[in-house]
Amino acid sequence: MSGFIRTVSSRPCSRRRPEGLILGLALVLTGCAADAELDTFQDQSETARQINDLAIPVFIVAGVVLVLVCGAILWMSVKNRVPADDDYEGEFPTQVSHNNRLEIGWTLGPFVIMVVIAVATLVTHLAINSTEANAIEIQVEVDGEDGKEGKVVTWEPRVVVVGQQWWWEYRYYLTKDITTDDLGDPWNLPEADIVTAGQMVIPTGEEVELIITSRDVIHSHWIPALNGKKDAVPGLYTPWKIEADEPGVYFGQCTEFCGLSHSRMRMQAVAVTPSAFQEWIHAQMTPATMPTDENSAEYRGMQVFSNFCASCHLINGLNDSDYNGAETVSGSAPDLTHFAGRTTFAGGVFNTYNPDGSLNDDDLAAWIRNPDDVKENYADDLPEGALPRGMPDMGLSERQIDDVIALLATLGPRPTAAQILATEVE
Amino acid sequence: MTITEPTTEGPKTEGPLELESGREALAERPLGVLTRPQGGRGWRDWLSTVDHKKIGIMYGVSAMVFFVVGGIEALLIRLQLAVPNGGVLSADVYNQVFTMHGVTMVFLFIMPLAAAFANYLIPLQIGARDVAFPRLNALSYWVWLSGAIFLNSSWIVGGGGADCGWFCYSPNSGVTFSPSHGVDFYAIGLLIAGIASLVSAINLIVTCLNMRAPGMDLFRMPVMTWMLLITQFLLLFALPVITVALFLLMFDRLFDASFFNPDAGADPLLWQHLFWIFGHPEVYIIILPAFGVVSEVIPTFSRKPIFGYTFMVFSGIAIGFMGWGVWAHHMFVSGIGPISVAAFSLSTMFIAVPTGVKVLNWLATMWGGQIRFTTAMLFAVGTVAMFTIGGLSGVTHALAPADTQQTDTYYIVAHFHYVIFGGGVLGLMGGLYYWWPKIFGYMLNERRGKINFWLMLIGFNLTFGPMHILGLQGMSRRIDTYSSGFGFEFWNMVATIGSFIIAVSVVVLFHNIWKSKREAADLPPPGPDPWDARSLEWMVPSPVPEHNFDEVPTVEGLDEWWHRKYSFDDDGRVVQIATAEEAAQDGSAKGVHLPAPSFWPLVLAVGLPLIGYGLIFNLWLCVPGGLLVGMGIFAWALEPVDDPDATHDHHDDDHGDDDDDHDDTASAPVAPGDDTASAPVAPGEQQGGE
């Protein structure tokens, strides 16, 4: 995949608005110079800019009011101060009890300010809740009469986002037009062309509609650089949208408290150029190639996967024929078909690769060895009849763990070096 | 906090209340167990008291205990978040701790501390001898305490605290997702505490409406009383909503109901609506009492009347009223439609208008005044400034689009702590310093008080100020840890340091209470009116005698007490016409008839948590619990109306009628209507002046 012009973390701080001075101060305070991948002021899309264009002037108005109030308090504290001891016997000040004109004035004044703010708010509110009718042409391969055949489809960019404890699933429907009405309940979604976990890939410059739901508790999908957040509610499809100006990796975090590992439920939106997006689609729609050399670690890893992992995880090309969802509370587990094509795993928390591009097998091994150790979940020592929430400790030997990692490493295609670097936050 | 029983201090063991005769007659009561206790000394007096002042003190002491509990939970949170990948608490324990921190601070600290002020001050400020229903008042306290202890007992017997957040959104609060008993304790504990608040709200509303002294029109009530009255109305209407929600939650969890189970077709947003229809008025329930304190303290220490009394009262009413129309601003991103979001966005913005009026009127009260910066005044002015910050950040997320970035981040945590801590807690702390001499008869040391104030103000701003930045930087709420590299490290460390400065300031407060008490013996007593204040509670001795007023005062205007000390000369200048000592009552009235104590509220309150444990662990436990409740109610109803001998006292006593010119039912030393219809003098009769 190509097209990584720059990443968020390497982007210099710059603003183009006249409120630069105050913003500069705000950015110093928010530590813009360092990594601030979730910073709401580092907007990278039209929607996020519209929000800040509304919020920042209001911050300034609020700041002015605050300075006036605190200034008045300080001024009176100096000017009107008398000794605090209770035998102070100075002459009383004029006993003013009220002034209706003044009080009506400072009822109406804030009212008028609020009306102005309200109008601006409504305008922005309508803008960020509107959707644009866009469509892009995508080359896909579908089953034809003579095996696979190429076909161009018109895709209205739309991703179904499904939250569950404690990771996000992204579903792309390219070959069929899916609206909210077609989705049914979130536990039995129609089969999608592409299913990925923890990372959502979007083409730059296109508004992508999100249909957000949940399979267990309420979560909230938030990628601050691209847009505000929207809750994922079980049984409800909430519409939202997302868009990125430039290629990059944009960080997100579940923001509705969703239980034990709420803090470790993260995600990234990976924005790529339209041509790179076409490549990504092609790769994702291709099933994984399974190892054939029986003496290879990958082959043994495949056997371990079939024995221990396949009851929950899916690898297209391995267990898709007899896969019936996961034995978990949400009924789902991340689709691993293109595991190594993503730069993070386990709910967007751990990096799949080290900065030098090598596989991060330390974290991978630790995760497979005992998931609860590195990301708390409820999957082990469950009461009778309870389903796990998260990945249980499968009791694999070190050898088995290494073999599974060897298999997972083949599930590409490998992301670009720029992408791997952009995933580093430190 | 050390509380000395007022009965043991001062020269009033001879006291105004000659119940001694009643005590002698005890053995001759025909009804045996159903005779009324005679109060007496020591702990038994506190367990059976129906005196609004003692109940207020007990509310205050208990609230401070839970302040420490919630504060320790807060410090644990800050320790965990001081550095990235903190290892102080596990994720599970962290979730319990932040949940219980919120629940404790809201339901077990601020609300009861405000209730302490409401109980203690409302009767005094309106010139009454007690609340309308003294035994119900005791019931409120004991039921609240039993709910509070029940709620916290889940740490010991419930396998940990609730782990669903104070807002406890479904379906995360369901058994599947929160299998421990914590949420059961949350639901039932808050149900029990809710009974207390509801009973107390009705009691105090009736008190304000029916028990005012002659001439005390509604619009002569101090702003404090007004704010407390509005608070009680908010409680009256808000608590039934949360009660319904908690009841449904309890049934979901304990009896497999499906009110909030999306698998069974339930709408998880139902809980959110119910919770926030309660939860938003709750914000004003917390903040309005503090507004009341500020509205008393600032005029006193500016030597001016409150500026724009009418606007202050009506803006309070407007806030209370509008507070019902903004709940969905907690749900801007929850999936409610864009039209709803727009409507609630607008309604939320305009609640800033009456709030702004209050701030500006406080400033106008100080304007041109003579400001004495006592500790109480420092806290009051600090409240105005800090609340203004919280109010302004509130406006920034009334903008629904901006809120999509801000909600559920630390920006919100900063906002509501500026409102609840910066407004509510600082305000009530000011109230503590202001009314302390009135309640306990000695002054809190001012120098230590000022250290207390500045440490708290600095610590508060260091803790919660940085959270604005953290939130806008994208730090989510309710996360048990964060990774390095997102730029959260520095300000989290600052916040943790700030939280420990707050802790030190609280230690200074307790030290001040203890040390000032010890020093008080060598200092002159504060007298009835140490601050040169304005409302009626300052015309009675400090500490307040059990019967409050020797003689119920006749009120001729706003700031009645101030006008008994000062008048205006022909040039409109203020001249003193009497010193506080001259104008005040000396508390020497004897034989004032007061409602007799009762143990039944306590008995009833003990039964409720037993029912709670029964619902959770074994339904058989409900039997003794139910029996205690039933017995409490029956015995309460059958309890003799009052101590027969005290009634005799009352009829023989001719005190108080000679030296005033209003009708004698108003000033007669009668009981503030007991909560039984056949009280010797019905409440209505007392209120001849209405």
Image (cartoon, coloured by chain):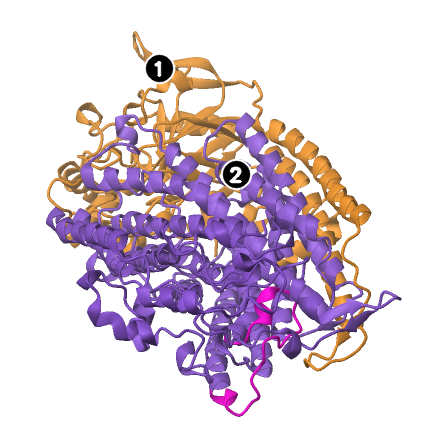
Chain colours: A orange, B purple
Residue B643, magenta (yes or no): no
**Dot 2 crowding, Cα within 10 Å, few <14, some 14–19, many 20+:** many
Q: Which residue lies furthest to the top in this view?
A: A145
Q: Is residue B154 visible?
A: no
Q: Residue at x 54, y 39 (%)?
A: B404
Q: Which secondary structure dominates the residues rendered in magenta?
A: loop
Q: Residue furthest right?
A: B571
Residue A228: x, y in percent?
A: 53, 38
Q: Which residue lies furthest to the bottom in this view?
A: B522
Q: Which amino acid does label 2 sit on?
A: Trp
Q: Which amino acid does label 1 sit on?
A: Val
Q: Is residue A320 visible?
A: yes
Bounds of the magenta span? B518-543
Mark 1–mark 2 Cα distance, whole angstroms, equals 56 Å
Q: In this view, does B367 lie to the left or right of B230?
A: right
Q: Residue at x 29, y 32 (%)?
A: B259
Q: Which residue is drawn at 79% across and 78% down?
A: A90
Which mark is on residue A142?
A: 1
Residue B393: x, y in percent?
A: 61, 50
Front: mark 1 or 2:
2
**Dot 1 crowding, Cα within 10 Å, few <14, some 14–19, many 20+:** some
Location of mark 2 (residue): B324
Camera-nearest residue between A417 and B657: B657
